Image: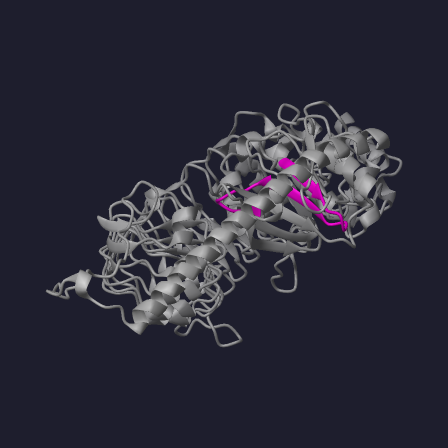
């Protein structure tokens, strides 16, 4: 038999490169009998595979069988691993199935392996050096396994390598400097392993490196200057290591992109042993959104240059030995969400200008030597959900808005601070007593002057007016009480005539002045319609559905009130039907509806419990953490490089980099919830389909969530009723 593909020893190598008639019997042998039954078997098997090859794989497979070199490398790769769960059983054939979809975790192009993706498979052993034979390999993803041993030096000899994810394993040894020789390398993640030694200077030679995560290891030494000048690096995470020495003051030097600026967006160096001053050159990194230098040994003062970082969202310098005062120029950080300076040696007063950072959600200045009063401007920060100035030398009264919003743990340890829960009340500012000596003249013999007579007359007139006002108020209160007594039975009769009643578990009442209706559901807060309408209100947020207020009732209790826009709400009867359903929903992860109010002019108010620590949205998006593409914890509608979050996720999944979508905190448990993560991601992409008609309704979503994780899926209401409509 003459096979022109040149692989007679491996009959299935490069099979699809030959036409059906290319493997034929030569003329001189066509009348000769076969000398061995094995040859006949191989020919028949060859033809059989060509006929019965599954149609489903043809769309994903280019028809080219894996090359001999890559086949041998994969066999060596499998031999060095410990497959306790049997995921690699599919790798047992002769190599034909490697590129046709038969081998788990393998993707090929033109007969060469381009992706090895085997996360969460419980694999042990180590990675073979023969992986260097896979010259077309672009991505190696083995994270969340139990793989040990060193990182193969041969990885640095792969010219097409773009991403290596080996985080959450047991890899030891040093980082091979050869990795800096990969010209296309973009993403390198070795976090949460047992790596030792120093960070190779040569890593920065890869000029396309975007993300470098070496956190949670045992690396030592200092930061190579080359990394501070990388023209491509956007994410650098070195926290939780044994790195020491001073941090180079060479950031943003020669390492600039085509726009002339350093692209670095996230720098996390916390929980190491760095010393010396904070590098002033950090002020050159104009794209920075996160700086985390906490739990080190930095000293000196806070550089003024940091105040020029207009895109900075999180600044954490906690647990160091930083001294001096807080720079007034920090108020220039107009995008800042998180400012953590606790456990340092800061002195002087808290700058009142910090109150100008309207985006601030967390401010922690505890355990310093700050003095003076707390600026009242801090109480005006609209999004502040965490505030702590405990254990300083502060004095004077706490601003009322702060004392009402935060408990005593935010203020304790300041002996001269007053006016917060659990502290002494602040002394009143009464005028000093008169020091005029008493007159020796007998008051009985003293004559009243014209001025004295006028003052006495004015005082008497004022007393008369006050008495009249009190009488008038009493009359009005009696009249209003009478109206309520008459309105109560009338409202009940009106409901009986209309055949309507309050919702199950709810109680309706009529308003005293306007004839509106207030319906209560179960809950700890009790109030009347007049209490609600007369409450002081503060705007918390706005949306297309209406405005949300924080309402403070007369007794001091607080509720959240949503006033719905009139043009988008339904008719009164349909509205009441749906809102009564919502009032019955009770779930630990959902905010309970406590009451609703229908005004005489059509206004509609929904009353919820007030959550002092902010909304779920502010908790998720109040501060930013970063992983590769920089999207974790960002608001879904916040665009980046022309893409919002749904568009970005869809593009990543399409490119088969699905694991990069999930937050690192979720990935730590991925060995047990990996399938749930992937199925939930599929459902989420379905829900944000560009075509509205293709999106599932609420019942379909609940059904699929029940299939993904049935033990935690619950009915939307205690009574087993149907889910309310999502139109409101």
Where is residue 490, by image quadrant?
top right
Residue 260 picture location, percent across and down: 49, 77
Quarter that holds the N terminus: top right
Q: Determine whether, in the image, residue 705 is placed left or right of residue 394.
A: right
> Is residue 202 shown to the viewer in this render?
no
Front-lying residue, 489 or 174: 489
> How many tags in the picture?
0
**471 in relation to 41, above or below:** below
Front-lying residue, 456 or 398: 456
Residue at the limit of the structure toward the bottom, as seen here: 260
Bounds of the magenta segment:
593-617
Residue 370 picture location, percent across and down: 25, 58
> Is residue 41 shown to the viewer in this render?
yes
Q: Determine whether, in the image, residue 696 is placed left or right of residue 112.
A: right
What coloring was used for the rendering?
one colour
Residue 644 picture location, percent across and down: 65, 58
């Amino acid at each position: 038999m003459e096979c022109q593909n040149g692989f007679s020893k491996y009959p299935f190598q490069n099979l699809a490169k030959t036409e059906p008639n290319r493997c034929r019997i030569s003329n001189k042998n066509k009348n000769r009998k076969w000398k061995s039954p094995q040859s006949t078997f191989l020919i028949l098997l060859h033809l059989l595979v060509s006929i019965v090859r599954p149609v489903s794989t043809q769309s994903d497979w280019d028809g080219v069988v894996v090359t001999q070199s890559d086949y041998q490398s994969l066999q060596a790769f499998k031999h060095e691993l410990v497959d306790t769960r049997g995921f690699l059983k599919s790798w047992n054939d002769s190599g034909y199935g490697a590129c046709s979809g038969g081998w788990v975790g393998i993707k090929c192009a033109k007969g060469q392996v381009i992706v090895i993706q085997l996360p969460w498979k419980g694999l042990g052993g180590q990675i073979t050096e023969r992986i260097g034979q896979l010259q077309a390999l672009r991505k190696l993803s083995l994270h969340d396994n139990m793989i040990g041993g060193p990182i193969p030096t041969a990885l640095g000899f792969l010219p097409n390598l773009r991403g290596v994810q080996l985080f959450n394993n047991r890899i030891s040894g040093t980082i091979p400097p050869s990795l800096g020789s990969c010209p296309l390398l973009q993403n390198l993640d070795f976090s949460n392993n047992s790596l030792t030694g120093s960070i190779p200077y040569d890593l920065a030679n890869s000029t396309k490196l975007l993300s470098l995560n070496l956190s949670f290891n045992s690396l030592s030494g200092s930061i190579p200057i080359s990394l501070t000048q990388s023209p491509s690096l956007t994410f650098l995470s070195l926290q939780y290591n044994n790195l020491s020495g001073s941090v180079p003051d060479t950031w943003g030097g020669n390492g600039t992109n085509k726009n002339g600026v350093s692209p670095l967006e996230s720098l996390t160096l916390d929980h190491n042993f760095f010393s010396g001053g904070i590098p002033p050159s950090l002020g050159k990194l104009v794209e920075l959104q996160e700086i985390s230098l906490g739990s080190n040994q930095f000293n000196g003062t806070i550089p003024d240059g940091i105040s020029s970082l207009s895109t900075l969202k999180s600044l954490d310098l906690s647990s160091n030995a930083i001294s001096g005062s807080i720079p007034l120029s920090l108020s220039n950080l107009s995008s800042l969400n998180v400012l953590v300076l606790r456990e340092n040696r800061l002195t002087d007063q808290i700058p009142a200008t910090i109150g100008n950072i309207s985006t601030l959600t967390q401010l922690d200045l505890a355990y310093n030597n700050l003095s003076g009063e707390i600026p009242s401007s801090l109480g005006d920060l609209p999004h502040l959900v965490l505030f702590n100035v405990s254990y300083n030398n502060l004095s004077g009264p706490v601003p009322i808005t702060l004392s009402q919003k935060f408990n005593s743990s935010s203020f304790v340890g300041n002996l001269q601070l007053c006016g917060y829960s659990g502290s002494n009340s602040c002394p009143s500012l009464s005028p000093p007593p008169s020091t005029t000596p008493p007159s020796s003249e007998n008051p009985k013999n003293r004559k009243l002057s014209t001025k004295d007579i006028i003052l006495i007359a004015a005082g008497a007139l004022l007393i008369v007016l006050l008495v009249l006002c009190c009488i008038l108020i009493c009359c009005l209160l009696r009249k209003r009480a009478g109206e309520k007594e008459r309105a109560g039975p009338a409202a009940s009769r009106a409901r009986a005539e209309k055949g309507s009643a309050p919702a199950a578990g709810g109680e309706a009442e009529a308003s005293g002045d306007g004839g509106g209706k207030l319906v209560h559901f179960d809950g700890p807060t009790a109030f009347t319609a007049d209490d609600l309408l007369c409450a002081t209100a503060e705007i918390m947020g706005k949306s297309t559905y209406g405005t949300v207020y924080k309402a403070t009732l007369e007794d001091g209790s607080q509720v959240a009130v949503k006033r719905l826009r009139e043009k988008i709400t339904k008719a009164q009867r349909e509205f009441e039907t749906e809102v009564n359903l919502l009032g019955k929903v009770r779930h630990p992860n959902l905010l309970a509806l406590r009451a609703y109010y229908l005004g005489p002019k059509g206004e509609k108010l929904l009353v919820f419990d007030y959550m002092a620590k902010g909304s779920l949205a502010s908790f998720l998006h109040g501060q930013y953490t970063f992983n590769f593409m920089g999207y974790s914890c960002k608001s879904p509608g916040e665009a980046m490089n022309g893409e919002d979050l749904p568009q970005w996720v869809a593009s990543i999944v399409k490119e088969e980099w699905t694991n990069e979508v999930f937050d690192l905190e979720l990935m730590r448990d991925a060995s047990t919830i990996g399938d749930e993560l992937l199925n939930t991601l599929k459902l989420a992409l379905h829900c944000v389909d560009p075509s509205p008609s293709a999106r599932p309704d609420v019942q379909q979503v609940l059904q699929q969530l029940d299939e993904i994780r049935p033990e935690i899926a619950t009915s939307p209401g205690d009574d087993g009723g149907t889910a309310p409509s999502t139109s409101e």
